[in-house]
Amino acid sequence: MPNRAMNQPHHPHPRQYQLRVAGSLSAQWSEWFEGLAITPAENGETLITGWVADQAALHGLLKKVRDVGLPLLSVNPLEPGAPGGADASGDSIQKE
């Protein structure tokens, strides 16, 4: 089965999402989450951010969160150019 999550928007209908989970994951989990960025927060939560091909791929990522056993706190679509989002090239935009 093809990898449906993406780091860059080259699919006709990708969307960038940020999943927030309770608990800490290291960047080593990025491969498990199909190359999405893993960002531990100081409050003990983790942000999982990146481009997702479609709703089926998003549901696959949600199943992976369930399989890891960390409570899902939120799922938010991100607009390109928004803090924590990415520009059209897929490069992360950092909040200053």
Image: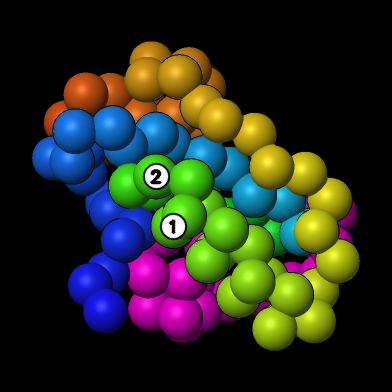
Number of on-image labels? 2
The answer to which image quadrant residue 41 occupies is bottom right
Relative image position of residue 84 (x, y in whole percent): 51, 31
Residue type for callout 1: Ala
> In this rendering, is residue 63 above or below 77?
below
User: Disc 2 designates what residue?
Assistant: 54
Q: Nearer the viewer, residue 54 or 44?
A: 54
Residue at 38% from the left image edge and 16% from the top image edge: 81
Secondary structure under badge 2? loop
Q: Quadrant of residue 8?
A: top left
In this orientation, does residue 31 appear?
yes
Q: Residue at x 27, y 69 (%)?
A: 3
Q: Position of residue 7 (x, y in %)?
A: 27, 51
Residue type indicated by callout 2: Asp
Q: Give SS at disc 1.
A: helix
Q: Is residue 12 left or right of residue 60?
A: left
Dot 1: few (<14), some (14–19), or many (≥20) neighbours within 10 Å?
Answer: some
Q: Which residue is mark 1?
A: 57
Q: Residue at x 77, y 44 (%)?
A: 74
The spot of residue 38 in percent (x, y) is 52, 62
Q: Is residue 93 left or right of residue 44?
A: left
* Callout 2 touching callout 1 (CB < 8 Å): yes
User: Is residue 95 or residue 84 the one in the foreground?
Assistant: 84
